Image: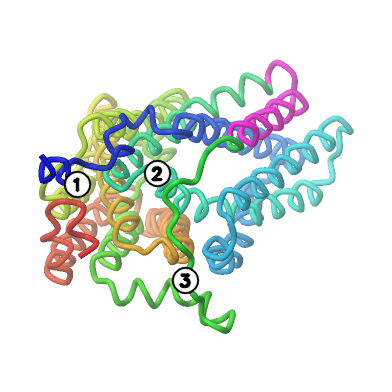
Amino acid sequence: MSSAHAADPPAEERVALHRQPGFVSFLVSRLAAVFAMQIQAVVVAWQVYAITRDPMSLAYVGLAQFLPMVVLLLPAGDLVDRFPRKRILQLSWGVQGVCSALLLALSLAASERVGAFYAVLALFGCARAFTGPTLQSLLPNIVPRSQLAQAIALNSSIMKIAVIGGPLLGGILYALGGGGLAYAVCLGCFAVALVLLVPVPIRFAEASQALEATAWRRFTAGIGYIRRQPIILGAISLDLFAVLLGGVIALLPIYAQEVLHVGPEGLGALRSAIAVGALLMGLYLGLRGIKRHAGMVMFVAVAVFGIANLVFAFSTLFWLSLLAMLVAGAADMISVYVRMTVIQLATPDAMRGRVNAVNMLFIGSSNELGEFRAGSMAAWLGAVPAAVIGGLGTLAVVGAWMRLFPTLRRVDRFDDASR
């Protein structure tokens, strides 16, 4: 009898994921916050362009948010490992709510001072630098280790729902009541997120350890840890170079107009197909998960991502291009799922903030630089050669990384990543 009881999992791990204390509240709070971010992104871009009529103003909208994030991510990761993570997330969402209130005030005043909008967006970017590493580090403190992979898949799916629905809702709100109504809804969403986060219990945090004496050592500890862990380094760098070389999102407007000959609704469908594919795959992974050969599954998924982008590159049929984007989104979700699970399980809790900050820095850089790579190469060679070269580059990276990181390739069950 005693041996049978010893083999049983802990009581909290026998509870279904959706019944884990605080997990559903955490998911809904994040859903509200991401909806607010997506609504705000659409509306502020529309307003700034309406004021300036200058396409470069849209680049500055992104830059105003991206630069503060790049500067603050490593210090943010340090703070996430030193102070209560839920409190940091509450402060971050609170500041983002203040930004929505400031944008609401600018809209109600009918202000055309575009510099004021950029200043608010810079503050918003500062707050977002803390949101990313905190969210990724907080989830393993809410659910047990055995259910972390499933929780990551469902968490990613929640974000995709907001990515699909948020921009659409933002456009509807702006059409109904202008920026004032849209920003008021954003403010309400952040308030809901903060209220729902309050009762979420932190049940699986590990005891804090002594940290390095100097700030510089603390900031760079995440980079050093990743360099010493080939599984984590391989997973992060594989995603970095696959997106950097293979992403085609920046080319979608060109393909829609000049290759597929569809209007703005076709462009919207192509962008939505990526998110829909990711959402469906995320829901599947949340229910079924990946039980074996996790490392190899990640490599296959990235290869499928590259092949899907190659199909899109050569396609002149709208339905085939739509299908290719759907498959690319689903394959990317598998890669994200494996990467995030491996990183969380292979990283001690006391290091998660700094490691996740580096991961967020890589993700942001790959997205921004990937769009620059695609756009500049399309300007030099044309959109189709740019997309083809990107897809082939992704497949080359997969082959090279399988040789460079055999430990990642050999990861079977997710628990192997922590050994």
- Give the residues in magenta: 175-196
Q: How many marks?
A: 3
Q: Is residue 177 magenta?
A: yes
Label disc, if present, on residue 405 of the rendered structure = none
Position of the C terminus, as image quadrant, is: bottom left
Please tell me whether mark 1 sits on a helix, a strand or a loop: helix
Q: Seen in the image, is 357 located left or right of residue 394?
A: right
Please tell me whether mark 3 sits on a helix, a strand or a loop: loop
Residue matched to label 2? 249
Asked if the residue under mark 3 is in contact with the one under mark 1, i.e. CB atoms within 8 Å, the reply is no
Snapshot quadrant of residue 66: bottom right
Position of the N terminus, as image quadrant, is: top left
Nearer mark to the viewer, of 1 and 3: 3
Instruction: Pick the residue in front: 192 or 51.
Output: 192
Q: What residue type is labelled 2?
A: Ile
Residue matched to label 1? 301
Nearer mark to the viewer, of 3 and 2: 3
Q: Is residue 357 above or below residue 230?
A: above
The image position of residue 161, as x and y in percent, is 44, 28
Q: Which amino acid does label 1 sit on?
A: Ala
Crowding at dot 3, Cα within 10 Å, few <14 / some 14-19 / many 20+, comes out as few
Q: How far apart are marks 3 and 2 (CA)?
A: 42 Å
Nearer mark to the viewer, of 2 and 1: 1
Residue matched to label 3? 209
Asked if the residue under mark 2 is in contact with the one under mark 3, i.e. CB atoms within 8 Å, the reply is no
Which mark is first along the chain, 2 or 3?
3
Residue at 70% from the left image edge and 55% from the top image edge: 122
